[in-house]
């Protein structure tokens, strides 16, 4: 079973993403900020990370940088409420930049694309 | 009979020594002679001054009426013969030739028979002749003749005495005249007054009816009457003729002109002219007219008169010489005084010009200075300024002199508004060599003094319709070898000629006026630029505020997006669990639809980039940097930050200038915040050649110690901010703008020293297809540089 980490400071978002992804047959871990996310990355052999950008203690951008340092192979998706920074994401070296939406089909299909094998 | 003769002689002695006037004595004597000799008529003929003619002066028959006056030349008639021989002549009518030679005497005594002439003479001179006429045949015995001869001798003595007396009287009169004139000469009377006195005195002494002093104008050669007395004829003999006429007398005597003319009434007028010569040149003449004799008859002038005239002429010449010297000194003094006046005026105008930097006010002060009576005093003055772009002289301001300037001093009057302004708005003179003196003065940078008489015939200029003057002066306003305008002055209203001194002063004023006007012009340009900069700064700050506001709004919108995602997401989950025909399904669908609507709205608001509102054009990067520097230079100075610029000339870049300025503005502000305690901001521009084209690059370096390594990677993160190093938003905005322009921002961090941000933007000609005229003009052929999105 593929392991996915969802890092978001909003409990409701974490719950929603977890429920939906579990239904798709993934094992879902949760973190409330970048620092917790890094701890989980260290402990669990994850297959994919979904990061919110704006989080307390450590934001998604910093977490993204450190994750990519530890595990350059691990796909990291940025899922954010900030659509207008899509252009800048290349600088931040994430694999995907997704704008949050109540319709999770886009998210789920992207995840599926990265974890298809 | 002897006693009779003795009585006669005694009576004669008594008569001649009496105190009655000389004329009276002569008269009495002639009567006595007639009585003693018992003759019909006794006469006295006087020898005139020329000693050529004997004129009837006294008759025993009473006063001689004009028609009975007789003259005998010496040697003619019995009277002339007696005078010539100085011997007694007794003739009788029947003797041969007597009647013919003495025919004029028949007027006095038609029936005369005997004539006896007794010369009145002493050892030296003949004074006249006594003549007796009688109808009888008389021979006069020797004793009678002796007695008469004795009486004639006594008469001669008396006459001599009288002559000497008269001479002495004349001399005294002359001396007193000379004394009076001398007094006048040494007194301080004006030259004209003095000349008048000399002329008047001359006329009075000679007893002439009129006298005139004529002076030759050495400039024009024309003669004018300088002073005159009494009546002078309309035509006075010209002194020039006098100079040419040879002196009739011996060499010792200076030349003179003497003559007589008949006027229309047949009356003879006499005149006498002597020259006024000084400094070896004929300078004029002194003339007298019509000497009045004792019987109110006009007489010819005698050598004595001439002598007096020479003396007077000499006086006039010396006083003229004195006066000329004095006048020259006075003219010099007056000129100096005028110079001092003009210089004082100039100084006051210069002072007044320092009171303002407004061009319009300066023009008013300059025009006041030119037209005020106690300024330079021109009737009219105009200022025209050069329009370099149009190569035209444009009317700036003009003014007319006012007679009434009130009691204000020059200093006060200079600052008053113009009393009589000349409208100059429609003045336009092209700067061409064929456009007349104002254009020429500006082109050749030299003053023009124009007289109507010098004007070439047939040439007229359009501006002359507005400005017609027989004489005017144009002086250029010159600053740094460049004519910035001209001043035109004239005195047309009063008709005075343009004097040398005010024109000289005007040229001095023009130098100063040119400088202050140029300064005022520069000042107003700087002021306008400052105003524009303030406006730009305000607009920048405004856009800064808008940016802040929009970031606040977007922050709030983002906060809404998260809960919406949850609500919508869970609603979807619920709808999956709800029975298909359950009423709940409808409710959940409503929630889903409403959330979708809100999300769509948010997307429209938040993902809107604003690119369509940008204004693209070709701009010079260096200019954009300079413009932006102006906005922050006050802030930089406040933080004691020096600016070092090394700007290389670069090809233009295609960009939205406001947005690029915003980039540099943010970079400069970041640098400033990094150097709170001072430092150096270095800005260097250069061109960069890369595989995909040429870029214009700007390197902005600060000396703020650099960015700590742990935050360096985060500086473009819009959510990253540190108190120590500016706001993350500024850099992220800068980066977004630069990437929208297909450029890049690089960071070079030197810990402990400072940071360099390098902004590189593609140069227009390599990347641009010609603008279509609207909105964004980046062509589809444009290839994004590396570093863009995947």
Image: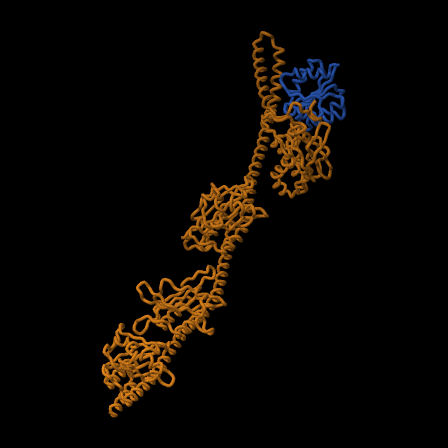
Q: Is residue B292 above or below residue B550?
A: below
- Looking at the picture, how far across and down is residue B103, in whole percent? 28, 75
State the blue chain. Answer: A
The image quadrant where one finds the N terminus of chain B is bottom left
Tell whether A105 sits left or right of B168.
Answer: right
Residue in front for this viewpoint, B685 or B674:
B685
Q: What count of labels does the image hold?
A: 0
Residue in front for this viewpoint, A70 or B621:
B621
Q: Is residue B388 visible?
A: yes
- Looking at the picture, how far across and down is residue B179, in whole percent? 40, 75
Q: Is residue B271 above or below residue A58?
A: below
- Looking at the picture, how far across and down is residue B280, in whole percent? 50, 67
Q: Is residue A33 visible?
A: no
Q: Quadrant of residue B747?
A: top right
Q: Is residue A12 above or below residue B121?
A: above
Residue in front for this viewpoint, A54 or B424:
B424
- Looking at the picture, how far across and down is residue B558, in whole percent? 61, 24
Tell whether A87 sits left or right of B285.
Answer: right
- Palette colour of chain B: orange
**Residue that lies at the very extreme toward the front in this rendered image:** B96
Q: Quadrant of residue B391?
A: top right
Q: Quadrant of residue B549?
A: top right
The image quadrant where one finds the C terminus of chain B is top right
Which colour assignment does the render follow?
Answer: by chain
């Amino acid at each position: 079973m593929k392991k996915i980490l969802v890092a978001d400071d909003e409990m409701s978002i974490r719950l929603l993403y977890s429920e939906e992804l579990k239904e798709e047959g993934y094992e879902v871990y949760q973190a409330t900020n970048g620092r917790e996310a890094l701890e989980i990355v260290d402990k669990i052999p994850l297959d994919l990370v979904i990061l919110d950008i704006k989080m307390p203690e450590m934001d998604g951008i910093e977490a993204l940088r450190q994750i990519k340092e530890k595990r350059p192979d691990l796909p990291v998706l940025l899922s954010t409420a900030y659509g207008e920074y899509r252009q800048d994401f290349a600088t931040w070296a994430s694999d995907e930049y997704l704008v949050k939406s109540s319709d999770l089909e886009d998210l789920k299909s992207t995840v599926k694309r990265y974890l298809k094998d | 009979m002897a006693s009779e003769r003795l009585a006669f002689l005694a009576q004669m002695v008594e008569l001649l020594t009496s105190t009655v006037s000389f004329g009276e004595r002569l008269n009495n004597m002639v009567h006595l002679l007639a009585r003693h000799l018992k003759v019909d008529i006794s006469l006295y003929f006087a020898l005139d001054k020329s000693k050529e003619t004997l004129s009837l002066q006294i008759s025993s028959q009473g006063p001689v009426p004009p028609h009975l006056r007789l003259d005998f030349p010496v040697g003619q008639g019995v009277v002339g013969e007696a005078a010539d021989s100085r011997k007694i002549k007794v003739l009788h009518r029947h003797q041969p030739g007597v009647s013919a030679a003495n025919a004029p005497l028949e007027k006095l005594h038609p029936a005369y028979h005997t004539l006896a002439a007794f010369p009145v003479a002493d050892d030296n001179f003949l004074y006249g002749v006594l003549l007796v006429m009688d109808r009888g045949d008389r021979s006069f015995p020797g004793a009678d003749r002796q007695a008469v001869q004795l009486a004639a001798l006594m008469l001669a003595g008396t006459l001599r005495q009288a002559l000497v007396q008269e001479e002495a009287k004349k001399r005294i009169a002359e001396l007193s005249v000379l004394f009076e004139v001398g007094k006048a000469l040494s007194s301080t009377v004006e030259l004209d007054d003095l000349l008048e006195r000399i002329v008047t005195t001359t006329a009075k002494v000679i007893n002439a009816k009129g006298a005139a002093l004529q002076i030759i104008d050495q400039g024009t050669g024309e003669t004018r009457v300088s002073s005159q007395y009494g009546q002078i004829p309309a035509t006075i003999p010209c002194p020039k003729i006098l100079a040419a006429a040879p002196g009739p007398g011996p060499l010792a005597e200076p030349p003179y002109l003497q003559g007589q003319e008949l006027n229309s009434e047949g009356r003879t007028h006499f005149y006498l002219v002597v020259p006024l010569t000084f400094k070896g040149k004929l300078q004029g003449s002194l003339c007298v007219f019509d000497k009045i004799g004792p019987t109110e008859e006009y007489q010819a002038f005698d050598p004595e008169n001439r002598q007096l005239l020479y003396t007077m002429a000499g006086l006039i010449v010396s006083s003229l010489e004195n006066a000329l010297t004095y006048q020259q000194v006075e003219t010099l003094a007056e000129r100096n005084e005028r110079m001092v006046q003009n210089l004082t005026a100039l100084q006051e105008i210069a002072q007044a010009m320092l009171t303002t930097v407004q061009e319009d006010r300066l023009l008013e002060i300059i025009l006041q200075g030119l037209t005020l009576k106690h300024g330079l005093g021109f009737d009219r003055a105009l200022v025209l300024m050069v329009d370099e772009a149009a190569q035209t002289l444009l009317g700036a301001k003009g003014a007319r002199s006012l007679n009434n300037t009130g009691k204000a001093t020059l200093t006060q009057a200079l600052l008053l508004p113009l009393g009589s302004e000349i409208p100059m708005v429609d003045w336009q003179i092209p700067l061409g060599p064929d456009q007349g003196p104002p254009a020429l003065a500006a082109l050749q940078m030299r003053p023009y003094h124009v007289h109507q008489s010098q004007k070439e015939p047939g040439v007229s200029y359009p501006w002359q319709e507005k400005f017609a003057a027989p004489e005017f002066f144009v002086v250029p306003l010159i600053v740094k070898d460049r004519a910035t305008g001209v001043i035109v002055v004239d005195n047309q209203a009063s008709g005075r000629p343009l004097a040398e001194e005010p024109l000289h002063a005007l040229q001095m004023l023009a130098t100063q006026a040119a400088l202050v006007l140029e300064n005022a012009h520069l000042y107003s340009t700087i002021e306008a630029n400052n105003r524009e900069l303030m406006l730009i700064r305000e607009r920048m700050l405004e856009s800064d505020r808008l940016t802040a506001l929009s970031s606040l709004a977007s922050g709030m919108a983002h906060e809404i997006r998260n809960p919406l995602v949850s609500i919508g997401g869970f609603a979807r989950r619920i709808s999956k669990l709800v029975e298909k025909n359950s009423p709940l399904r409808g409710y959940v669908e409503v929630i889903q639809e409403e959330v979708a609507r809100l999300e769509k709205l948010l997307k429209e608001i938040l993902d809107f980039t604003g690119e369509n509102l940008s204004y693209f054009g070709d701009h010079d990067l260096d200019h954009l940097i300079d413009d932006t520097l102006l906005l922050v230079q006050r802030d930089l100075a406040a933080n004691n930050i020096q600016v070092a610029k090394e700007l290389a000339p670069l090809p233009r870049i295609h960009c939205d200038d406001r947005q690029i300025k915003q980039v540099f503005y943010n970079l400069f502000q970041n640098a400033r915040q990094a150097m709170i305690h001072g430092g150096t901001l270095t800005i260097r521009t250069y061109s960069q050649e890369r595989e995909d084209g040429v870029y214009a690059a700007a390197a902005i370096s600060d000396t703020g110690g650099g960015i700590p390594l742990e935050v360096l990677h985060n500086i473009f993160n819009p959510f990253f901010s540190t108190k120590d190093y500016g706001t993350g938003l500024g850099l992220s905005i800068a980066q977004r703008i630069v990437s929208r322009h297909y450029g890049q921002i690089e960071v070079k961090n030197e810990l402990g020293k400072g940071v360099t941000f390098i902004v590189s933007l593609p140069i227009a000609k390599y990347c641009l297809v010609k603008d279509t005229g609207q909105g964004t003009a980046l062509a589809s052929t444009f290839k994004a540089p590396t570093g863009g999105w995947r």
